[in-house]
Image (cartoon, coloured by chain):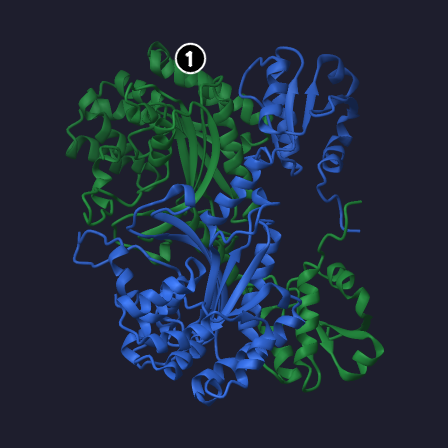
Chain colours: A blue, B green
Amino acid sequence: MGKYGEDSKLIYDLKDQGGELLSLRYDLTVPFARYLAMNKLTNIKRYHIAKVYRRDNPAMTRGRYREFYQCDFDIAGNFDPMIPDAECLKIMCEILSSLQIGDFLVKVNDRRILDGMFAICGVSDSKFRTICSSVDKLDKVSWEEVKNEMVGEKGLAPEVADRIGDYVQQHGGVSLVEQLLQDPKLSQNKQALEGLGDLKLLFEYLTLFGIDDKISFDLSLARGLDYYTGVIYEAVLLQTPAQAGEEPLGVGSVAAGGRYDGLVGMFDPKGRKVPCVGLSIGVERIFSIVEQRLEALEEKVRTTETQVLVASAQKKLLEERLKLVSELWDAGIKAELLYKKNPKLLNQLQYCEEAGIPLVAIIGEQELKDGVIKLRSVTSREEVDVRREDLVEEIKRRTGQPLCIC
Amino acid sequence: MGKYGEDSKLIYDLKDQGGELLSLRYDLTVPFARYLAMNKLTNIKRYHIAKVYRRDNPAMTRGRYREFYQCDFDIAGNFDPMIPDAECLKIMCEILSSLQIGDFLVKVNDRRILDGMFAICGVSDSKFRTICSSVDKLDKVSWEEVKNEMVGEKGLAPEVADRIGDYVQQHGGVSLVEQLLQDPKLSQNKQALEGLGDLKLLFEYLTLFGIDDKISFDLSLARGLDYYTGVIYEAVLLQTPAQAGEEPLGVGSVAAGGRYDGLVGMFDPKGRKVPCVGLSIGVERIFSIVEQRLEALEEKVRTTETQVLVASAQKKLLEERLKLVSELWDAGIKAELLYKKNPKLLNQLQYCEEAGIPLVAIIGEQELKDGVIKLRSVTSREEVDVRREDLVEEIKRRTGQPLCIC
């Protein structure tokens, strides 16, 4: 309680069946912080893939559910500045690159820079949160609309809004960091200066990691959650592969995170702090994009990894099929057979086509006498006789399974 | 609701926050059956590793929790008798063998044999359930005690109990199946005859799968859950490796399952049945046994798979460490570095000893000039200079990572 602010209304509570107040977890970050505090851990690095729950209206087509997976990675501990933060960004880029979901960009900002900027522009402390959330809309609507909201709805003086506008419409690389370090007003604000200094260092490390071209310092990035205290970041896809050729289009955030140095202390009786930095990946969001891509490519997704179906050409060979499939299983081959006493060969071959199984090991009476198995490639329909003792190696060779360490 | 009988009191309910009655799942079998019915699936084979919840008193030391993992494997569909059932038992044996948690035995029985046996012994239908649960205690207490319960508490005539006793104290292999098929009374009962016929076939298939020596036909196996309709089985460990040398000791069930042909139909509006057979593995139970074994062997469990720590011999080499660790990550090596600007070499080596990291890649000023990296084995303390371009291959070679498909 008291960690998610307004979002608390989205928490699922359990019925009180035995004098216990229990809830389903809303995210993996707050439980992680609680775990560190309860177990007095002062440094750890871990990933966690698990379900979280939100009592919200689901939007299935956009990959938004009430029960869904998050994949979190966090580094907790007192370390030298920006080294773990850079590793988090490296991991984010590694994951998004290897998923092949198209070009992406990681927007980076720092809560201390935002705080300092609001302060020097003349925003009162009490309005910081609400102005912050207006700024966060800049990825969806124009500056004019955001300014209207700030002035009309939130009562900011137009000249204050304009000063904010001059800053938050800027984005760029390390050169923008250096430019702002020379900014006569911003550089006078202690918090902003710390944030900018750390960002400069971060960019150095990201260059060494070879991912600086994926990173954009974006002063409009604000992030919704309360608990961030330093660097924040958010990965957006520029276009899905299905849209390739069309104009790049922001399709929203697929991963995000930042530094939260105060959260663990909120759970510790003595308020002992453990600095943390982490990231969270939206698994269903990414799945829906991957599915769209595969649909566009008309590619079928295999739901199994079966390498070979053990089949028979004649009746009364169930026992032989069971013996062979067992041999293959014991040798580490992913094999299947139809659960029928006397399946037709055609049905067995059709099953392979539907399930995307690449090979069929066909047992026949003549083959049994000769000590061979007919190995058939489903796509090419080629068949060769393989000696039974060579079958495992031949299947491994054809399905690209490592044979040995050489 | 209405699927778990008495155990329903152990279900966690969610608070009604928006007109919805929701509960946390109690097991993976009933949700699987509901999934099949709702999606009109008539055949599928799947595994599922996920959490289930029981509002019960936890017993941590025995691996019994309120939130815990089950690993289920099920085969649904209309198939020829005993082929999927045999595959389930093969998988159970494969998993338990490869976990190296000691010798185990899989007790097998059939609900139809139990039903038939109770009928011919003179148990009235209404007492079947309660007598069944008495029988199920035979793995923990003596026949005398079970008989006392049947007669004293449950009002069975002593001669009826004695007739049951003659049957349920028997266990053996396929020869016991054949013996009972000749039993003048049991062989007259249609249900028992069907069950025995299927068990005979099952033993044939299990012999072909090479696991018949792990299987014991045990007439005292009854299983608690209501929904089983045919073959039932339960794997028990005979001794944990920690107890090796002592008398074999039953340490309880670690996996169990059976055939449930009626459950899917309970969820289908038209009552359409989908025959199913499956198994469930108690993950925490097995973890606690593995942990006991490792404690007994005084073996440390590594919590990471890191192959190499990127370290430096002198100060001011953070940038070089970041560059090298990034190179190694990009090449698929599991590498780490300490998040310190200028860590001491000794601290870096100690970290490897504690974390069980086998290799250290040490960067030094002289090595940088020579284009080499010092590769140190943590256990043997041997050091060799490796040319930077050969480092990835050398680490793969030393940590047994496959280099190529040959």
Q: Is residue B97 left or right of residue B321?
A: left
Residue A371 vs A260, above or below: the answer is: above
Residue A166 vs A316, above or below: the answer is: below
Q: Is residue B94 left or right of residue B402?
A: left
| Residue plotted at (27% across, 66% down) | A153
Q: Toward the viewer: A173 or B307? A: A173
| Residue B338 in sight | no
Q: Label 1 lies in what chain?
A: B
Going by the numbered disc 1, the residue's amino acid type is Gln
| Residue plotted at (25% across, 50% down) | B55
SS under mark 1: loop
| Residue B145 in sight | yes
**Which residue lies most toward the bottom here?**
A188
* Coordinates of residue A394 in the picture (x, y in percent): 76, 33
Mark 1: few/some/many CA within 10 Å (<14, 14-19, 20+): few
Q: Toward the viewer: B253 or B122? A: B253
Q: Toward the viewer: A371 or B397? A: B397
Q: Which residue is mark 1?
A: B182
Q: Is residue A112 left or right of residue B356?
A: left
Query: For residue B209, which quarter of the picture?
Result: top right
Residue B217 vs A144, above or below: the answer is: above
* Coordinates of residue A12 in the picture (x, y in percent): 26, 53
Q: Toward the viewer: B310 or A121? A: A121
* Coordinates of residue B152 in the picture (x, y in percent): 16, 33
